[in-house]
């Protein structure tokens, strides 16, 4: 049993080491500085950016970095009650027959934006906030 446990720990350690070895040291340094209390970190490398998915204060967060280690954006799922009041009101007024299937906050150098996916039986609409008081349609599609 002890041998199995030791092999398991070595495998997990090696997997984690391989996961972070592929990440540029500048990206890791920025991540460790910006997200000191992050846990359960996993990394993905895309062609032009790195993506870190992790827990911060019990919430799921994603951070995107340039290949040189600069933070591009930080995203987290939120509840509709966490939206600015005007955005909540706009959803209630204009889309009361829809339900929310996805909602997240995106922080970039340009500021904070919110994206919401709403659906009814026939349609799926993705909207992006324009400031803290209005929504604009980002994408519309019909369900099959």
Image (spheres, rainbow, N blue to C red):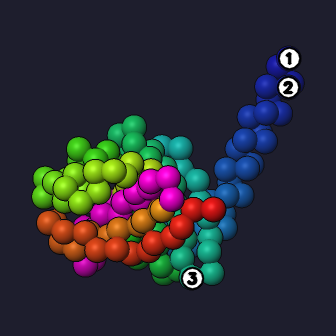
* Coordinates of residue 17 in the picture (x, y in percent): 68, 54
At 44% across and 74% down in the image, what residue appears? Answer: 139
Q: Nearer the viewer, residue 111 or 66?
A: 111
Q: Are marks 3 and 2 in contact (CB under 8 Å)?
A: no
At 57% across and 62% down in the image, what residue appears? Answer: 143
Q: Is residue 26 above or below residue 86?
A: below
Q: Earlier in the sequence, mark 3 or mark 2?
A: 2
136 left or right of 69 in image:
left
Q: Give yes or no for residue 115 being in the magenta stretch.
A: yes
In the rendered image, the residue lying farthest to the top is: 1
At 32% across and 70% down in the image, what residue appears? Answer: 128
Front disc: 3 or 1: 3
Q: Which mark is residue 1?
A: 1
Label 3 sits on residue: 48
Dot 2 lies on which element? helix
Q: Nearer the viewer, residue 45 or 68?
A: 45
Q: Which mark is residue 4?
A: 2
- Can the viewer see residue 67 in this picture? yes
Q: CA distance from mark 3 to mark 1?
A: 44 Å
Q: Give yes or no for residue 71 being in the magenta stretch.
A: no
101 left or right of 7 in image:
left
Give neighbour class at mark 2: few <14, some 14-19, many 20+ (Cα, 10 Å).
few
Q: Earlier in the sequence, mark 3 or mark 1?
A: 1
Q: Are marks 2 and 1 in contact (CB under 8 Å)?
A: yes
Q: Quadrant of the N terminus?
A: top right
Q: Which residues are magenta?
A: 105-122
- Can the viewer see residue 30 in this picture? no
Q: Are marks 3 and 1 in contact (CB under 8 Å)?
A: no
């Amino acid at each position: 049993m002890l041998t199995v446990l030791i092999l398991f720990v070595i495998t997990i350690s090696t997997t984690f080491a391989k996961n972070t070895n592929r990440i540029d040291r500048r990206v890791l340094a920025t991540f460790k500085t910006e997200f000191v209390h992050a846990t359960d970190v996993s990394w993905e490398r895309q062609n032009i950016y790195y993506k870190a998915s992790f827990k911060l204060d019990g919430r799921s967060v994603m951070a995107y970095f340039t290949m040189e280690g600069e933070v591009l954006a930080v995203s987290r799922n939120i509840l509709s009650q966490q939206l600015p009041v005007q955005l909540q009101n706009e959803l209630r007024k204009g889309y009361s027959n829809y339900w929310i299937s996805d909602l997240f906050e995106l922080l970039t150098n340009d500021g904070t934006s919110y994206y919401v996916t709403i659906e009814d039986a026939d349609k799926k609409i993705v909207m992006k906030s324009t400031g803290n008081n209005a929504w604009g349609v980002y994408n519309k599609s019909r369900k099959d």
